[in-house]
Amino acid sequence: LNDCVFYFKVYVACQSMLIVLVGAVPKYHIEQEGSPASRAELAERIHFVDNFTSIVTEARSFFFSQWYLIEQEAYKVSLASSLFFAGLLIGNITFGPLSDKLGRKPVYISGLFFDVVFGYVTALAPNYDVFAVSRFFVGIVNGGMALVSFVLTQEYVGKSFWSFTGSLTNLTFAVGIAVYALLGYCVREWRCLALVANTPGVIFLLLSFMLPESPRWLYSQGKMAEAEDALQYIALGNGKERLNLKLKPSAGTLRKDESAPGILNLVKHPVLRWRTIVLMYIWYVCSFVYYGLTLNAGELRGNLYLNVALSGLVEVPAFPLCMFFIEKSWSGRRKTMACFLIFAGFACIFTMFLPTNAGLLLSPTLLALCGKMMVSAAFNILYIYTSELYPTVLRNAGLGICSMSCRFGGILAPFVPSMKSLSPPVPFVVFGITGLSAGFLTLLLPETLNKPIAESIEDLQSPKYQLLKNEVNFIVF
């Protein structure tokens, strides 16, 4: 079951990073001096050198109008990227609470369906306006259903496996960036690349109908019989014999005549309120630094496709480090995440002390890649850590609100590299300072290692949630 969701993250990565290659600016020169008087004149005088196409080089045909997003129109590439992240913001706000109310599976499948539809609209867009709007809608459904799929993956397994499944899920996203770079290297026409990157979504959509609903969500809603059936289905899929399993309602389990807790409980409950404020800022910083460094990969020196692939592959070593440290009692989730954020901040700041023409071992690019590895490690832990800090009835709502603030970082990130016009190190200094601040704020949160997962808001006050307790309904895993 989880294999489907893991590989699905490769598709999510291709959609998220689409603009890095589809919006890449090839080398070009314009014949004659002076600015062209019109787009038609520009089309006659411009000559692109590199052997790939993008929305920047879109040529005139019977169906498609010329775009030529250079010079005064160059901002539209960053704008399309920001619109995607603005869509992620809306998707996180809406899909989280919806999945808490309606269930994980139906919301996830609906989002994936529309993600595929709008992905094809992006590839066939006749002009920039349609392209930009389609990217906005892809962002809404992509961000929403990616969030729900992560929660669904976590809730399929017991808490002892959360660090492993969470890390593996995010690892496949990093690998997906490298896979997308390989696709871009093989498919140089941007419309074909967008089609190829979007088509696997159809396969995942069909496979997703085989997934069961989250047993944790069913249990939190008081649907004991359905939760038992889901657990039996998962156990049989793991090769176990049918178990005689009977779940008992917890004190916070919803009765049939009760409604699920609303998102306002994140504000009303004092523990959840301050926890959410701190987490929102940390999510914002992780997104701001992570996507700022990732989207900047296309502007680094050297081969475009190699740089994009390295920006993904450099994250791979971070995940085994995460899985090792977050399970140790002397480090846990909180200290490990704080250290990774602080190291990422220092790595970015130290770029200002290195000459741009130095060798690879002493170049700002190497430190930037190190910062990317550290912040991706922190981002990976953040997903797991946040899932453990919220009770089941509010887990998706909490993740949705945190991801909402995360998307503000994504919206601003594409414009930060332009600050290098002031001085080349300025963007990295901005990333570094924000990373350091988030690292120190992380120390204000509680540790969740070896603590049970709360199912309801009432559980947060229960003394039993101070000790790890093996629940019967996890033995099937």
Image (cartoon, rainbow, N blue to C red):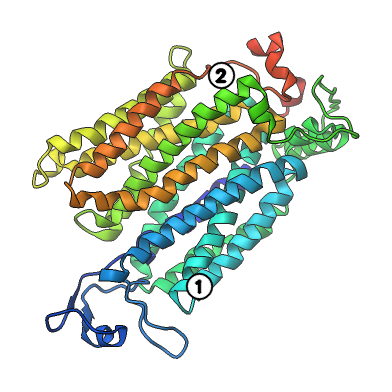
Can residue 325 be seen from the camera position used here?
no
44 with respect to 109 (left or right): left
Answer whether labels 1 and 2 touch (C-beta < 8 Å).
Answer: no
Rounded to the nearest whole Å, what is the CA distance between mark 1 and mark 2? 45 Å
Mark 1, mark 2: which one is toward the viewer? 1
Mark 1 / mark 2, whichever is N-terminal: 1
Q: Nearer the viewer, residue 109 or 99?
A: 99
Q: Residue furthest right?
A: 257
Q: Position of residue 212 (x, y in %)?
A: 74, 44
Locate the N terminus and report the quarter of the image it occupies. Answer: top right
Density class for disc 1 (Cα within 10 Å; few <14, some 14-19, many ≥20) is some
Label 2 amino acid?
Thr
Q: Position of residue 348 (x, y in %)?
A: 25, 36
Q: Position of residue 25 (x, y in %)?
A: 28, 67
Identify the element where label 2 is drawn: loop
Q: Residue 130's mark?
A: 1
Q: In which quadrant of the rendered view does residue 254 lie?
A: top right
Density class for disc 2 (Cα within 10 Å; few <14, some 14-19, many ≥20) is some
In this rendering, is residue 459 above or below 290? above
